[in-house]
Image (cartoon, rainbow, N blue to C red):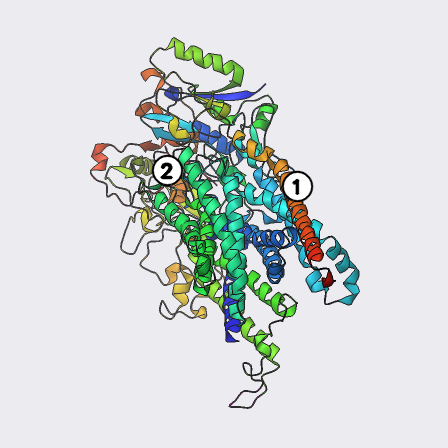
Amino acid sequence: MSKAILTDVTKCIGCLKCVSACKEVHHLDADVPRVWDKNDGLSAENWTAIVFKDGRYVRKQCRHCLEPACASVCPVGALHKTSIGAVVYDSSKCLGCRYCMMACPFGIPRYEWDKAVPHVEKCILCYDRIEEGKQPACTEACPTGATIFGERKELLPLVHARIEANPGKYIDKVWGEHEVGGTSVLYLSDIDLGFLTYPTVKGDKPLPQETVTAMESVPFAFVGMGGAMLGLNWIIRRRMKLGEEKAKKKDPAHE
Amino acid sequence: MNRAKNAKLVLWILAGFAAAVALNRYLFGLGVTTNLNDRTPWGFWIGFDVMAGVALAAGGFVTTAVFYIMKREEFHPLVKPAVLTAFLGYVAVVVGLLFDLGLPWNIWHMIIYWNPHSPLFEVGWCVMLYTSVLLLEFSPVPLEEYSRYAKIRNFLMKYRFVLVLLGIMLSTLHQSSLGSLFLIMPERLYPLWYTHILPIEFFISAVALGLMMVAFETLVSHWLYRRDPETVLVGKLCRVAAWVLALYFVVKSFDLGITGKLGLVFNGKWQSDLFIVEIAVSTIIPAVMFAVPRLTRKPVVQWTGSFMVVAGMVLNRIDVGGLAMYDSTASYTPSWMEIAISLGVVSAACLVFLFVLERFNIWEIKPADPESMPQTAPSFDYSSRSWLGTPDAASLARHSLAFVLSFALGMGMMSGKRLHAEGVDSIRVSPATGIDTLCINGNRDDQYVEFSHEGHIAWLRTHAISLTIDGVVHTASPSGGDSCTFCHHLNLPGEKVSNCAECHTSMYSEVDFFRHGWHASAVGANLKCDDCHATGVTRNAASAKKCTACHRGYDFAPGKGAAGPELYIPSYVDAMHKLCVSCHIADLREVSSLSQTNGGILSGKDKSNLAQCASCHRTGVPPELRADMKWQVKLPHYDNVVLPNVGVTVK
């Protein structure tokens, strides 16, 4: 029962009610441009933002990947994907290494650079509201139905049906269906949404798999290097011993 | 012996300077100290302090492998300094990390919360374990001095081989895993550096760097204490390094060739140039120099070669750690404070190294403390014949003085403005334009609030209203003639209606409207305390005279701005919101029904019916208003972002 959000870019009117609702529900402070901002509207105080691109309003938020890179790299497991589909953050575990920010292919997590006790900030899919049986604040606030909430496996057929029902209206692609292994935030659009990802992220391979080979070979490298060193040491000692015996034989008076 | 003394003086100065910056970092956070940002969350501290630091400390495991495993007895003089360097290097890495981590007091969480998928988890554990191993490997040296610890020392000596073996195994893991950290971010790291064999490249280069760091450290410490350099041994290290560097070069070129990235090396981008410089300095030039056995015995070659490898490989780690980003718009250059902290950590490690070198039996003949040499530290001042204390005390005094002075200098260099600004660019507001209909846009390019000035005047002339915002009472009544002062609550001398941006000059930060310092300073108003504050009571804003007592020309309407000197006045955004929203609060809560015309996309007019930010803030200034506008600086933030959500706080 993996939940998901579907955003239909063609229906968004840029009213920002989702942004306001998010701020209200999560008690986020006033947002001012900071020198460390990434210029895409998201910040530690703005978990979702509307980007104006090619005449369309595109809502940006955490994509809640099915195999999240951020959760895979966190050394203390402060980020994890819950059963309802949200990738959530446990600030009590975090050490502030910011590896999640480096690893995210969508560049979503933000940091409270101005605080002496800083935390990572990002959309948490209102998992607490979902557990209460409500839907996320943003989808609830949307007046046009541009962004809706539901089961991921129920939303996907709906999206494809919508594409088929309106031939030519949409690009025949669901953003988030397969990219980096699929995400829980899906987009339907008539403009290319490639800009939401880093341009160099290609293919549908989940990013955590990039490190699997390296991490799996760790025990072998450990034991292998130990064995190699012991073997080398044994050979060298034996050679030295043989050399000594040889020298002894040659020159018995040496003793 | 002046070399060691002067070197220590410089190290103490750097450490003191860093201590001041450290204070700033812990009190005010990473934002004001570093140039790190949401685009480049890792920077110089990860690249230099952590990644280069670990690699620089590789000399420990390489030297012990050569001596204990391969039984090359001739390297014995290098083992103790190498293990000490490695131990201090790892301690420096951990200390450096304490500055970089946002929540450094949680660093121990790695022990209890496990995520074995994370390369960083593995690196963290290896560093913890290896630092402990290094401590055990090295502790027989200081324990030698104390006979009561002989048992512990013997125990450690007995199992030294096991420790060495464990150390090598752990080093193999985390030296390579530092490369694995970046495998998950093909989108960030420039392709010339990103490769699936990055862990292997990191391991090979760490071995080369370890060898050369031992060589460089030997050369420097022997030069400092005027010892005969271990030319023969260092020469041997250089010859081994030539092979390792050659292997590194072959592996790297082979990998670039197979993945078809060779073309990227010469495409003239700044990343390519960086790559060429890095590989030339770290690998090609030193390898060629060391390839000739005759040359490796020459001190000049040893000095330049080892320095080039050290500098080049450090550059490599900084490149991978954040400099060689794919996204060329991600602009990050380390701030001077970041560099100061890194230098300070390294300096502190060097000071401990020199102390241990002088205090314990690291070398076969201990170097004498330069300060205890009678010819360099006179006990009596020549002119006054006054006693200067024992040489030790004189040395302490000089070094403490250097530390304290540089600490003070560091504190002085902290910019108070930056501390208050909290990362907010000071954005000067431009006044609203227009006559009957004002276009209020501050200086936000193409985003504006259409404000009917005439309409508001007409309304205020026919309605009675009283509003208290932040202690300032705004009133207007049909007969009072105060429809102007309802909004224009304070005006410049001689003006009836000064515009809002005149005082609320800054877009997002509070403005020091009163400037106490200027009033009290001799070059300012040159007032004495008693000129404004009543005597016998606490001197604060409440006990001060009203501004109007002196500034008679100001048009203070009754009850407005006369409550007392306002030290800080709200930012333009806050002032506007408070004034507008306080009245329009009812309008804002009301949601009009949407007209589903235009294929679900509302036109500009319909949009204003929505009850949120977009009710007032609009995009696309109409031509008739545009002609009137004086564009100021375009905001550097929010390219293409619609109406950044400004938090509305209403009291």
The image quadrant of residue B600 is top left
Q: In this figure, which residue is indicated by the disc labeled 2?
A: B262
Quadrant (top left, top right, bottom left, bottom right) of the N terminus of chain A: top right
Q: Where is residue B645 in the image (x, y as percent from the top left)?
A: 42, 35
Q: Main secondary structure of the magenta part?
A: loop
Mark 1 vs 2: CB contact within 8 A = no
Q: Which mark is residue A227?
A: 1
Q: Where is residue B297 in the image (x, y as percent from the top left)?
A: 47, 62
Circle 2: element type: helix
Position above or below: B232 against B425: below
- Residue at 55 percent across and 61 percent down: it is B233
Q: Where is residue B294 in the image (x, y as percent from the top left)?
A: 45, 60
Q: Which of A138 and B278 is in front in this view?
A: B278
Circle 1: element type: helix
Position above or below: B331 against B340: above
Q: Nearer the viewer, residue B320 or B147?
A: B147
- Residue at 37 percent across and 34 percent down: it is B643
What's drawn in magenta, residue-wise? B379-386
Mark 1 or 2: in front is 1
